Image: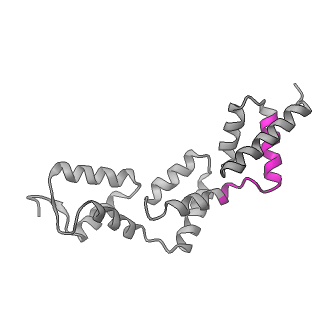
Amino acid sequence: MPLSGEEEKRARRKAMQLLERMDRTEKGLREKLRQGGFSPEAVENAVDYVKSFGYIDDARYARNYISGRLGTRGRQRILQELYQRGIDRQTALDAYEETAQLQETDERETLRTAILRKYPEETSLSDKEMRRLYGFLIRRGFSAGDILQVMEELGIAVSGCE
């Protein structure tokens, strides 16, 4: 069924309204328009329309997203969140490298800060506390090797196992 001029205008208008409120990925905009009841043709037309003006740019979205999360989450968690939002792997990796270099972010320092927010240096933890801390850090996207190494540097160990 051909796309009606009226539906095309409404879809474009809706796309512009959605982007006024917040930056979105191409995938996110498509989903919102589909939820709005627009036909697949109208959705594609509206996405092409806003892309032609540079109103939607997944690389820019990824850089902004990363910038707001560096220092609070690990690389893997940030990249996973971007994949879930429809950013392809290479775009996400390039954006991460660029943003991390610009902000001179050290992931191990971020990890160190996250641990020290929970426990002071030279702390002995129970088995349960250690599992909790480790699980928390893994969910934040830090690598197991980095976690164990930084915890050792900080002198944080399971009580009774020095």
46 falls in the magenta region: yes
In this rendering, the answer to whether 101 lies above or below 56 is: below
Left or right: residue 157 compared with residue 78? left
Give the quarter of the figure containing the N terminus. Answer: top right
Left or right: residue 159 compared with residue 70? left
Q: Position of residue 86 (x, y in %)?
A: 62, 46
As drawn, the residue found furthest toward the top would be 1
Q: Position of residue 108 (x, y in %)?
A: 37, 68
Task: Identify which residue is drawn at 66% across, 60% down.
Answer: 60
In this rendering, the answer to whether 51 lies above or below 104 is: above
118 falls in the magenta region: no
Q: Position of residue 88 (x, y in %)?
A: 62, 51
Picture quadrant where residue 31 is located = top right
Q: Position of residue 5 (x, y in %)?
A: 91, 33
Dominant secondary-structure state across the stretch colored magenta? helix
**Numbered disc total:** 0
In this rendering, the answer to whether 87 lies above or below 43 is: below
In this rendering, the answer to whether 122 lies above or below 5 is: below
| Colour convention | one colour
Q: Which residues are magenta?
A: 42-60
Q: Nearer the viewer, residue 34 or 150?
A: 34
Task: Identify which residue is drawn at 18% across, 48% down.
Answer: 128
Picture quadrant where residue 39 is located = top right
Give the quarter of the figure containing the C terminus. Answer: bottom left
Left or right: residue 161 compared with residue 98? left
